[in-house]
Amino acid sequence: MVEIDPWSSTTYKNYARLRDEFGIQEFTRQLWGDLPHPHRLLRRGVVFGHRDFGRIKRAIKNKQPWAILTGLMPSGKMHLGHKMVIEEVIYYQSIGAEIFIAVADIEAFATRGFTLNEAEKLAKEEYIANYIALGLKPKNCQIYFQSKRKEVKDLAYLLGKKVNWSQMVATYGFSGSTNMSHIFSPLIQTGDILHVQLEKYGGVKPTLVPVGVDQDPHLRLCRDIAQAHRLYNVNLTRDGRIGVFVKVDRNVDDLLDAAENVAETMGFKELERITEYKALYIDDAKVDDIEKLDESLAFRETEFGGYGFIPPSSTYHRFMTGLTGEKMSSSKPESAIFLSDSPEDAKKKILNAKTGGRVTLEEQRKLGGEPDKCMVYELFLYHLIEKDNELEEIFNSCKNGELMCGTCKKKAASLIGEFLEDLREKREAAKDLVEEYIVD
Ligand code: TRP
Ligand code: SF4
């Protein structure tokens, strides 16, 4: 059994295995293919998995409101690995999502030893300034601090009612010496993800959380919690019927009326209501209808004092390997290109990077290089080359031994130099705009 520990710094190599083991679905072309101008991270398999992305597609298609919620941990300088999430967010903003970004200052305090003030300063000067420089727009976007948003903290406390200690230990491996703030931080993250569905923030809606795969335990926990607080449950019974079940003891009749109403509006006709089972059976519904039924019922729950949380959808991207061949990490500066590096520093790191080149030029001409194992190629793939045909050309000419690593590194160094220079200017300009994005 592989375990995912969101606070460790291990790198994951076998993404397909992770996906299978945790029930993450493959992020196929079918899913991104008909989105408007799909982002390169989606097209190129960097985003490799998802849960319930279909729900988001349905919202886009039906022009319903939907949201992106993601979080940033202010714990060091931003590097290229951190750039991926925000690029995804900016892409989703461009196709109509409402954007919420949590500054995980409570988590940074609880798990990394930062003070709230340090976390705030770092978030504003380093992360948010870069986000704006990379293209995040203020419209339909709010960035908030966990420590300042009452609804997030309240939800963390209240939703914790349906999680017990054994579940936390099984999910995170907490032990008797783990501090209480740390133990509580996954609940704060659940508060982050679900609070956007409260009425104050626009109400019940499909929400997509784009993250690195290390965050999946938090998503599993959050989805379980969302489900546990629902008033209805829709499922396939043992005798093969689709049933809507009321999970609470208050307002059962009214809840069943509402369920009947929802089923009829959706066009179902073969309904059988059995009040003493608190059930409504829908015999002309199919398994494929469960998700839509559940979603339509969610919208009615707030009338009865429920939250009606729609379980969050998520996508997972791969980590960058890092220039040295290990995980890109702030604690190993030579492995990472920081967004604040000078073009000269970045160039030096690229010249020292691990490539998929052969030992001699002669051998490389004969055998070709190995772009799949090359950190320079990874830079092109993830960040530096926008056009797919140009990337493909590099891949092929490396493979067939026409392209040599020296030429390639020069190209990467020059592209990253231009990028960093341009970003530096934009970041300077962004510093005065940071407060515009922050909403308490
Ligand atoms: N735990 C995340 C990290 O370590 C940060 C985070 C906080 C987050 N709240 C979130 C991520 C909500 C996604 C959704 O980076
Ligand atoms: Fe990597 Fe370029 Fe060398 Fe191929 S030629 S191994 S892509 S650096």
Image (cartoon, rainbow, N blue to C red):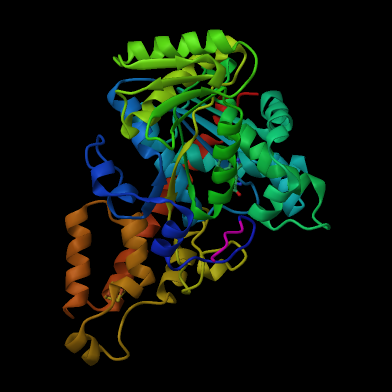
Give the position of the C terminus as an image quadrant: top right
Q: Is residue 183 visible?
A: yes
Q: Quadrant of residue 191?
A: top right
- In the shown orientation, is residue 327 left or right of residue 182? left
Q: Quadrant of residue 406?
A: bottom left
Give the position of the N terminus as an image quadrant: bottom right
Question: Percent x, y for residue 173?
Answer: 69, 58
- In the shown orientation, is residue 120 left or right of residue 412? right
Q: Nearer the viewer, residue 26 or 127?
A: 26
222 lies above or below 248: below
- In the shown orientation, is residue 408 left or right of residue 239? left
Which residue appears at 42% of the width and 62% of the height?
Answer: 15
Q: Is 284 in the magenta?
A: no
Q: Nearer the viewer, residue 322 or 21?
A: 21
- In the shown orientation, is residue 91 left or right of residue 156? left
Which residue appears at 46% of the width and 61% of the height?
Answer: 18
Q: Main secondary structure of the magenta part?
A: loop
Count of picture labels:
0
156 lies above or below 336: above
Which residue appears at 24% of the width and 79% of the height?
Answer: 404
Question: Percent x, y for residue 157?
Answer: 74, 31
Question: Percent x, y for residue 105?
Answer: 69, 41
Quarter of the displayed picture in which ligand 2 can be seen: bottom left
Residues in magenta, as a range: 1-5
Q: Is residue 319 visible?
A: no
Q: Quadrant of residue 329?
A: bottom right
44 lies above or below 68: below
Q: Nearer the viewer, residue 180 or 107?
A: 180
